[in-house]
């Protein structure tokens, strides 16, 4: 090697044939700033092959191998004299021997050899090097020793290391006192002791990782500047937390033949950091307590998949690997962050670059591999299922609490280990690093943005699922509850939300309109067209709450659904009267209830007393009901009205509550609607959904298709579908679509007879893939009741797009242009008023 530069330090290391000495020499010689010239010494130069391999390109540049025997003063002097101007800025005394075995098995000569090498070898080195350091008034001496030097206990198992290391430690401390007070050098000659966590201090240490740690520790001690960052590519050191850089560098990279970083072979998808040690023999650092796991998302390299360029001009040209992406992303998890590393893919034809985690690349992977990308799924699952108080603000609050508690647990563990060293101080002063600060959790608006993007990525499947929903008994109902959440340009453009459901409670369509009249024409036309395109038979009954009949001619609703001439329009029975329970079902329920009360210790009771113990919910669950018939209904209502016009219609003061003239007029007008509330003949309105044991008897449970009660329940849940108090038109609709999908799947699962499945998922694509694999492997489907959605047609507007419609207000104001958004047959926006 050449003469060291002014800003370079000469490092002399002993015992470099293996172990810590070898790792020290290689590590210091590879310093990126080339601040050191390393002379690695060993007793036998024939054992230097391992060091030559570890040094790589630094051999002959910043590292040179020399012969030195610490037991021979002549060898030490010859080695130091061969250095330029006998200059040694840093001396690292690492050479040593050890004896293992009972003390009675060791000879005196062997013990003398250990003492001569471990203790007197250090003395010989210092006698040769220390005078020159004093003359230059600068120098640094690092003495490698075992923790047994601190403990100082005599062991009958390994007497050599214990006794000699203790002597070395005492000698080091004496040198510190001597050099700091007597010579008055500036900068002073310092003597540092690096303790190994191993009790045996021998030159052949098999723990390579421990050797690397000791090398890094020693390098930080001998350098007058802050510790160098670890070897990481591109902008990784700036975008990865400091506590993760070291273990990631060791886990993912190696130094290639050309001295450049290379990815290791046999890469994994997930990498987990090393955990804190169970016992610490030296002061810990916070790295292991606060390190994060890493997701290495490289599908092109890990799975050898063939990916294509999406540029139409490239004709689906295959992509090739472009190396690691320059930045590391931080991914928000339930209780902590983790690192995301990805690869860059390049089209060699158009030079377009893609990231492997982009939606374009993910959609080209099969479902099994795409499901491994779990970056956003964990948090979004919390938003998809919304209940009372379960909004984005609450979720962000819960995330902050989870992150804070996990961080505090790590702080408690780390500081507890540090405090233990304060209670048992060693010979050297201790300095503890502060824990890294807690990473902040984003605001709720960020979470809503990510959630919206997730829905848009799944929009094709959502639209296909909703437009694949049909029914033979339909219900139509309207509400104003949800329109108040519209904000921005769409605020005030819609007054009603009208929904159409089927017999099991699923929603086929929802429409926002300015009123309930002609604004529903597009909805009716689209619904009839959907049935026709799918080849599904038209429904038999349509339940509404108004416009069900007319004295003369055809109603507007009938004309609106003119494509279904045979559909029977009925009024929701709950808007008029109750029904009569089936006698057989009621008898069975009474019998089961009597047995149940008897088992609970109730005394015998009459039929009237028993009926008081039967709740309305039990009647609805176990009894099929039917209407009384048109003539009977008219007769009973007429009788009831006459009684109310008499004495039974008075209040407590004897005042008649009803106006007889007005009551007779109302009854005359509404009498024609009695026909609309009767059950159509030969139409099954009840579906058996399962059984229930009550009082030792098996009762059937039923689902009723009559009326629009299910739609009213759906409208009560609409506010939960859309998070927050207000939202723009785009988010309003995609949130509503997501809620519709989950509502329909829940209603479909509840309508299936038998015991409910333990599976609960809303990802139809995943269920379909699993069913296919199960059918091929085991000859059956895992979820037999699942039906994959059909592909929606162009008629239903497969692309999310804005249209315009002219709206004229009731006050005859000038027409204005307002947005109308149509999603997969669910048309949102105002309509033309009459």
Image (tube, helix red, strand yellow):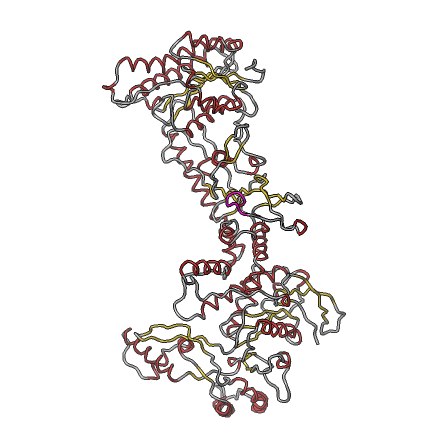
Q: Identify whether 154 is placed above or below 285.
A: above
Q: Is residue 705 left or right of residue 105?
A: right
- In depth, the one of 738 and 65 nearer the eye is 65
> Is residue 190 in view?
no
Q: In this view, does 678 lie to the left or right of 526?
A: left
Residue ranking furthest to the right: 814
Q: Identify whether 264 is placed above or below 535.
A: above
> Is residue 623 in view?
yes
At 72% across and 72% down in the image, what residue appears? Answer: 809
Q: In which quarter of the image is the N terminus?
A: top right
Quadrant of residue 182 within the rendered picture = top left
Residue ranking furthest to the top: 74
At 49% across and 72% down in the image, what residue appears? Answer: 504
Task: Give residue 589's position: percent from left, percent from top.
Answer: 36, 79
Residue ranking furthest to the left: 104
Q: In which quarter of the image is the C terminus?
A: bottom right
Task: Give residue 95's position: percent from left, percent from top.
Answer: 40, 18
At 30% across and 74% down in the image, what residue appears? Answer: 696
Task: Give residue 623's position: percent from left, percent from top.
Answer: 41, 79
Segment tinted magenta in the rendering? 300-305
- In depth, the one of 600 and 194 nearer the eye is 194
- Residue 345 is inside the magenta segment: no
Q: Identify whether 779 is placed above or below 421.
A: below
Q: Identify whether 45 is placed above or below 439.
A: above
């Amino acid at each position: 090697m050449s003469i060291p530069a002014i800003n370079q330090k000469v490092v002399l290391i002993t015992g470099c044939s293996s172990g810590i000495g070898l790792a020290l020499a290689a590590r210091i010689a590879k310093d990126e700033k080339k601040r050191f010239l390393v002379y690695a010494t060993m007793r036998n130069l024939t054992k230097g092959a391992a060091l030559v391999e570890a040094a790589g390109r630094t051999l002959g540049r910043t590292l040179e191998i020399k012969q030195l025997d610490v037991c021979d003063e002549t060898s030490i002097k010859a080695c130091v004299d061969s250095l330029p101007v006998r200059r040694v800025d840093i001396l690292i005394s690492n050479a040593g021997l050890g004896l293992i075995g009972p003390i009675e098995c060791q000879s005196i000569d062997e013990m003398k050899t250990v003492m001569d090498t471990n203790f007197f070898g250090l003395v010989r080195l210092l006698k040769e090097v220390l005078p020159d350091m004093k003359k230059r008034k600068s120098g640094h001496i690092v003495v490698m020793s075992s923790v047994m030097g601190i403990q100082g206990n005599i062991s009958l198992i390994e007497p050599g290391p214990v006794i000699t290391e203790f002597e070395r430690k005492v000698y080091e401390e004496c040198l510190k006192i001597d050099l700091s007070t007597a010579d008055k050098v500036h900068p002073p000659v310092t003597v540092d002791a690096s303790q190994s966590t191993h009790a045996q201090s021998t030159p052949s240490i098999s723990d390579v990782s421990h050797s690397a740690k000791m090398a890094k520790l020693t390098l930080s001690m001998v350098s007058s500047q802050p510790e160098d960052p670890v070897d990481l590519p591109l902008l990784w050191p700036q975008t990865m937390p400091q506590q993760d850089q070291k273990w990631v560098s060791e886990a993912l990279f190696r130094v290639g033949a050309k001295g450049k970083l290379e990815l290791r072979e046999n890469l994994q998808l997930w990498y987990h950091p090393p955990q804190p040690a169970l016992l610490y023999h030296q002061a810990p650092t916070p790295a292991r307590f606060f390190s994060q796991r890493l997701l290495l998302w490289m599908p092109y390299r890990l799975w050898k998949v063939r990916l294509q360029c999406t540029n139409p001009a490239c004709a689906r040209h295959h992509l090739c690997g472009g190396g690691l992406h320059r930045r590391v992303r931080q991914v928000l998890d339930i209780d902590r962050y983790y690192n995301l590393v990805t690869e860059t893919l390049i089209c060699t034809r158009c030079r377009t670059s893609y990231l492997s985690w982009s939606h374009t690349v993910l959609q080209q992977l099969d479902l099994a591999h795409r499901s491994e990308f779990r970056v956003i799924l964990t948090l979004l699952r919390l938003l998809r299922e919304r209940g009372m108080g379960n909004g984005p603000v609450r979720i962000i609050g819960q995330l902050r609490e989870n992150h804070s508690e996990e961080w505090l647990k790590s702080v408690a563990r780390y500081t507890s280990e540090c405090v233990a060293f304060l209670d048992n101080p060693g010979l050297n002063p201790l300095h503890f690093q502060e824990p890294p600060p807690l990473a902040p959790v984003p605001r709720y608006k960020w979470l809503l943005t990510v959630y919206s993007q997730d829905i848009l990525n799944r929009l094709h499947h959502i639209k296909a699922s909703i437009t694949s929903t049909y029914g033979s008994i339909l219900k139509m109902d309207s509400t104003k509850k949800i329109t108040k959440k519209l904000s921005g340009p769409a605020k005030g453009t819609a007054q009603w939300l009208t929904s159409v459901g089927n017999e099991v409670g699923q929603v086929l369509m929802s429409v926002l309109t300015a009123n309930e009249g002609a604004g529903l024409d597009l909805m009716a036309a689209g619904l009839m067209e959907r049935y026709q395109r799918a080849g599904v038979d038209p429904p038999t009954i349509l339940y509404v709450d108004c416009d069900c009949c007319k004295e003369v001619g055809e109603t507007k609703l009938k004309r609106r659904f003119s494509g279904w001439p045979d559909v029977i329009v009925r009024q929701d029975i709950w808007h008029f009267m109750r029904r009569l329970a089936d006698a057989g079902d009621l008898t069975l329920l009474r019998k089961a209830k009597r047995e149940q009360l008897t088992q609970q210790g109730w005394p015998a009771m009459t039929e009237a007393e028993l009926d008081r113990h039967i709740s309305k919910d039990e009647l609805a669950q176990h009894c099929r009901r039917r209407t009384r018939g048109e003539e009977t209904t008219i007769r009973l209502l007429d009788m009831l009205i006459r009684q109310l016009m008499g004495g039974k219609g008075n209040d407590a003061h004897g005042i008649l509550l009803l106006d007889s003239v007005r009551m007779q007029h109302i009854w005359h007008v509404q009498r024609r609607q009695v026909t609309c509330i009767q059950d159509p003949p030969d139409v099954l309105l009840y579906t058996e959904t399962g059984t229930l044991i009550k009082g030792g008897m098996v009762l059937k449970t039923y689902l009723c298709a009559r009326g629009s009660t299910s739609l009213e329940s759906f409208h009560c849940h609409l506010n939960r579908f859309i998070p927050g108090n207000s939202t723009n038109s785009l988010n309003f609709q995609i949130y509503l679509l997501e809620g519709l999908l989950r509502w329909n799947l829940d209603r479909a699962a509840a309508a299936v007879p038998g015991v409910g499945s333990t599976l609960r998922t809303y990802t139809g694509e995943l269920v379909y893939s699993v069913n296919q694999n199960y059918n091929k492997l085991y000859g059956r489907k895992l979820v037999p009741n699942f039906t994959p959605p059909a592909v929606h047609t162009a008629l239903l507007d497969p692309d999310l797009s804005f249209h315009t419609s002219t709206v004229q207000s009731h006050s005859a104001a000038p027409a204005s242009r307002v947005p109308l958004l149509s999603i997969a047959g669910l048309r949102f926006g105002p309509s033309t008023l009459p």
